[in-house]
Image (cartoon, rainbow, N blue to C red):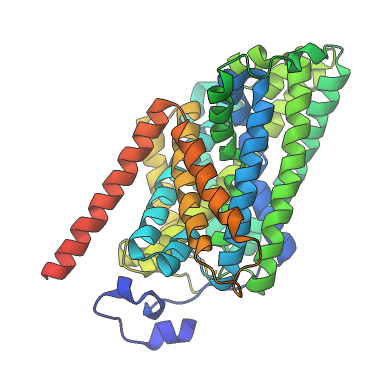
């Protein structure tokens, strides 16, 4: 396929013939374990160290119910993504699936939402890194880590997987320390788990589910690596559920431990909720290690985000929805180098303009829930022979994504809807220009 793309003539409208686009293919170098590690690196970190704060503010101890809601929706999304990725093992994820199953506009809208929403997430994770490493110079440190990780990604995707493996091990060790310190620090109070619907009611619980969904979105990174995994029809369907299951167990354990030790009010008011849970007990000596782990986690999440956004950007450029130069593939490392650099430049620009972590979580959740609603709608169209899971899971996924998205904070809903509207208008203007030309 790669050779055909390189030799074949460019169609008059490349977006209508995406598979004929004249670019090189990416190298298949990742096995199932590599893909699972990349998914874990994307998920474990953001939710644990960032999303529990706003979720506790919305729902108190009810965030545990919100976590379960987010996990159910994430599972539906995972099964839909896995089925579709097995059929369409290309970079781009739901951008490709929506295009192939629902039409060019829906694929474009999914890709647009993913790129914009995850670019905001990149900036937020970079700022998290800067705040933990050097609060007085958070933004310069954030820019520096974006530059450094982009250099790692440009060196090749196997190097990205290797670094992610180290980061995941460090973060899991840190979270183990959090659980030990929280449960062994002498401050455990079972009463902290009571009155789960008292803060924000059921609306707040559903809102916390939408915020915590931010933490489960990492398995999309596995699907966006569809052209870089070996035996994608076998590897991707295995890697996505495994990564999701491991992450859910970790999240539930840490959430219960933090709530028992610190209580929902303490978590809601803390910039570093897990550090607060440790500092409140007799094992506060472990707090610096927790902060170090949060720093490492932010690096892992940012690394995976940069990979995922650049691959979707590459796929959209290859199909003509973004500038063609973004579809360039490095002959040395076989990665989309121009897309990698472009994403880094945009993230740095967002950092310079200012970004707030909690607002970024809500905005990103809205955009990514839209992305997965399109993925589930795409999976709904699969035939009985193409389907690997029951069709009703895809329908539940659509309903769950919409339900979580509309209950997010108003600013996140309005901002996300505005960005999607801009994307839709851009698509319509471009289509009108093509037809008029």
Q: Is residue 121 above or below residue 13?
A: above
Q: Is residue 338 visible?
A: no
Q: Is residue 279 above or below residue 394?
A: above
Q: Is residue 209 visible?
A: yes
Residue reaching furthest to the left: 436
In this image, 258 relative to 18: left or right? right
Q: Position of residue 383 (x, y in %)?
A: 55, 72
Q: Position of residue 212 (x, y in %)?
A: 59, 34
Q: Is residue 131 above or below residue 330?
A: above
Which of the 4 image quarters holds residue 199? top right
In this image, 159 relative to 368: left or right? right
Q: Position of residue 213 (x, y in %)?
A: 58, 39
Q: Is residue 92 above or below residue 351?
A: below
Quadrant (top left/top right/bottom left/bottom right) for the C terminus: bottom left
Q: Position of residue 89 (x, y in %)?
A: 56, 71
**Residue drawn at point x = 71 percent, y = 67 percent:** 31
In this image, 275 relative to 334: left or right? right
Q: How many marks?
A: 0
**Residue drawn at point x = 38 percent, y = 52 percent:** 112
Q: Could you say which is closer to the camera, residue 334 or residue 81?
A: 81
Q: Could you say which is closer to the camera, residue 299 or residue 28?
A: 28
In this image, 10 relative to 374: left or right? left
């Amino acid at each position: 396929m790669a050779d055909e793309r390189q030799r074949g003539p460019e169609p008059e409208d490349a977006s209508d013939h995406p598979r004929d686009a004249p670019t090189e293919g990416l190298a298949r170098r990742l096995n199932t374990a590599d893909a699972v590690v990349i998914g874990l690196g994307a998920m474990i970190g953001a939710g644990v160290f960032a999303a529990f704060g706003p979720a506790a503010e919305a729902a108190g101890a009810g965030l545990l119910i919100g976590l379960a809601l987010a996990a159910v929706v994430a599972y539906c999304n995972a099964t839909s993504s896995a089925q579709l990725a097995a059929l369409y093992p290309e970079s781009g994820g739901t951008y490709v699936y929506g295009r192939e199953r629902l039409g060019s506009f829906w694929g474009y809208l999914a890709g647009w939402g993913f790129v914009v929403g995850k670019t905001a997430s990149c900036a937020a994770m970079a700022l998290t890194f800067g705040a933990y490493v050097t609060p007085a110079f958070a933004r310069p440190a954030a820019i520096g880590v974006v530059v450094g990780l982009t250099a790692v990604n440009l060196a090749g995707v196997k190097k990205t997987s290797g670094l992610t493996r180290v980061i995941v091990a460090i973060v899991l060790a840190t979270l183990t320390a959090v659980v030990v310190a929280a449960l062994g620090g002498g401050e455990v109070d079972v009463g902290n788990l009571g009155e789960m619907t008292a803060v924000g009611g059921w609306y707040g619980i559903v809102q916390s589910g939408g915020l915590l969904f931010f933490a489960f979105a990492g398995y999309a990174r596995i699907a966006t690596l569809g052209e870089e995994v070996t035996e994608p029809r076998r590897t991707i369907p295995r890697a996505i559920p495994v990564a999701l299951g491991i992450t859910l167990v970790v999240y539930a354990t840490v959430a219960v431990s933090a709530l028992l030790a610190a209580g929902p009010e303490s978590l809601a008011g803390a910039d570093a909720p897990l550090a607060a849970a440790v500092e409140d007990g007799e094992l506060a000596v472990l707090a610096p290690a927790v902060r170090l782990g949060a720093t490492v986690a932010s690096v892992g999440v940012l690394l995976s985000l940069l990979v995922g956004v650049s691959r979707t950007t590459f796929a959209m450029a290859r199909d003509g929805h973004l500038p063609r130069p973004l579809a360039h593939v490095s002959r040395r490392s076989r990665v989309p180098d121009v897309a990698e650099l472009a994403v880094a430049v945009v993230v740095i620009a967002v950092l310079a303009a200012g970004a707030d972590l909690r607002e970024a979580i809500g905005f990103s959740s809205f955009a990514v829930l839209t992305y997965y609603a399109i993925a589930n709608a795409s999976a709904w169209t699969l035939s009985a022979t193409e389907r690997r899971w029951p069709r009703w899971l895809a329908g539940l996924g659509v309903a769950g994504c919409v339900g979580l998205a509309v209950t997010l904070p108003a600013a996140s809903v309005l901002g996300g809807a505005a960005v999607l509207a801009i994307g839709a208008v851009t698509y319509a203007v471009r289509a009108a220009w093509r037809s008029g030309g």
